[in-house]
Image: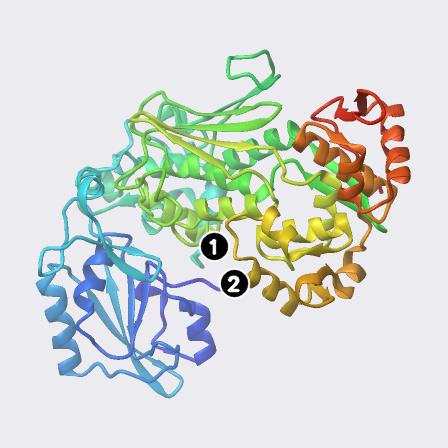
Amino acid sequence: MVRLAHRLADISDSLSVEEFWDLVETVENEMLDFKRGVPDSLYQVIPAMAMTNGGLIVCGVDDHREIVGCSLNQGTQDRIMRYANECDVGVELKSITVGRHELVVVEVPDVRERIVTTPDGRLLRRVGGDSQPLRGDALARFVGERCKRSAEEEPLTRLFSPGDFDLNAVNGALDQQGRPAADFAGLGRALADLNVAEYGDLGSAAGGEPVVMTAAAVLFARDPRQFVPGAEVQLVRRLGVDPGPGPASDRQECSGPLTDVLGCCLAFLEKHTQRYEMVSGLFRESIPEYPTSVIREAVLNALAHRDYGLAGSTVDVTVWDDRIEIHSPGPLPGHITEENMRVEHFSRNRRLMRALRAMNLVEEFGEGVDRMYREMEARLMLPPEFKSTPDSVTVTLRNQFLVDIEELAWLEMLDSWPGSAAERLALVEVRRLGQVPKRGFVELLPGIDVDSLLSSMLSNGLLVRVGRRGGAQYQLSRDVIATAGASGIATPQGRRRLLLDEMRRRSSLSTAEAAKILGTELSSTRRLLNSLVEAGLIHARGNTRARRYFPNDSNSTVCGP
């Protein structure tokens, strides 16, 4: 198992080049920065890391990730310590050998309960691999949140016995960090190793045991509600789509170690959401109503970022016919807003987040919300909706697709080949119509650079162009057809679906309009429309010349093999 390093203790004195890159990654992030030498920019990186989550600065690696070396001589040490001292941050240094080169690794601590600025007075935060300033209201909210102690760090409200904790859960977390298993006698030391108990500033309990924090109960207690009132999730399945209470068909409470709570919630949500079984070409596809990874991320965010100081408040999950709502106690933390949450990050419960990352339950800090948006976009669904109040945060996931289920199954057969939502929508449109001119993509994708999109899809082997200049059309490539098939408008089912979709979009169609959409003769178009009337999917109004066709049910879909 590869364990990514964000502390000096995680890094051996001597590593091969491969071992080094496995351990520290190649992409800079908020907890990792590479420098060729010891530049003046450490004036920004050190305070920015200290005000985010701490991290490592590796000196001796250039912008192209070439290991060029940096020696820990007196001049290097003095220069680094001068930068750190002028920012009032205590850093640690370590010399390591990677292949044939010496590198200097600087560990920057996560500074809490005070503010660290650059020597010229700016407050910076790490956003990805950059150090960016905070200003205005965001600065004020950050300072207020940063300078108060999080409820997760409060000592437990009552005495506990080792039997109150799930030793298997504790040892599972230790194993993920490469640490030996503990028994009940060594529970205190194990919790301190996991950074949810402390010997230092909090003092020590009787017998020299560390003081155990609220975060430990949330993560590992058999029943955390004994220590943290409200440390549970209330789940309910309500019928209908109304904003009112609605009748409930099922309820459940989930409590226990955080990993058990997550599993309990996901099981309830799987039970009360649908799976679509579709046949596309020769393959059967099973598609969940909501992307599993998005549901998991939303629940995990609620558990990890809620305010545990709001005694008695629970995380509430409601499943409706058309959406899932996940309600978490406490406002957005620090400088985070609904507008910046995709790119900014602030941990109210940093100990919980570090433990979850060490347990491989989360990946990079701050990427969860952006990943939810990207996953919903990839599935051609409406984006997540976040609503923040001074008391809570609610995320809503809606089960509305921009294409029908059969088309989604077809896209699933292409796996992650078409990367963007625009590419996927373009592919569906070409599959529906057989071939599409450039102007068709312009109408389909307003605001998208269609020239760049088509150029990318041609070079990636998704589409082929036939014809020239103004008469050029775009068709599915042979590779796409070989992978997922091409049945769309070429089949009667595809033509029916296209007409129904256009009829709902425009409210009604004439025979001439339908013929233009399909590119077919009026007589064959009229026969197709009459077959839809006979099937009860549409109805006609008016005489022969002025006849228009209207959909009977705006929510009906036509799916086929």
Find out whether the residues at labels 1 and 2 contact each other: C-beta distance under 8 Å: yes
**Crowd class of label 1 (few under 14; some 14 to 19; many from 20; radius 10 Å):** some
Please report the residue visible at 34 percent of the width from the left and 86 percent of the height from the top.
101
The answer to whether one can see residue 369 in this image is yes
Q: Nearer the viewer, residue 16 or 369?
A: 369
Q: Secondary structure at mark 1?
A: helix
- Residue 241: x and y, percent? 58, 19
- Residue 9: x and y, percent? 32, 65
517 left or right of 317 in image: right
- Give the image quarter of residue 528: top right
Residue bearing the label numbered 2: 1
Of the two numbered discs 1 and 2 on the same chain, state the one appearing first in sequence: 2
477 left or right of 42 in image: right
- Residue 224: x and y, percent? 40, 29
Residue bearing the label numbered 1: 176
Identified by mark 2, the residue type is: Met
Give the residue furthest to the bottom. Answer: 100
Give the residue furthest to the front. Answer: 545
- Give the image quarter of residue 129: bottom left
**Crowd class of label 2 (few under 14; some 14 to 19; many from 20; radius 10 Å):** few
Please report the residue visible at 53 percent of the width from the left and 33 percent of the height from the top.
397
Colouring style: rainbow
The answer to whether one can see residue 188 in this image is no
Please report the residue visible at 70 percent of the width from the left and 25 percent of the height from the top.
554
177 left or right of 137 in image: right
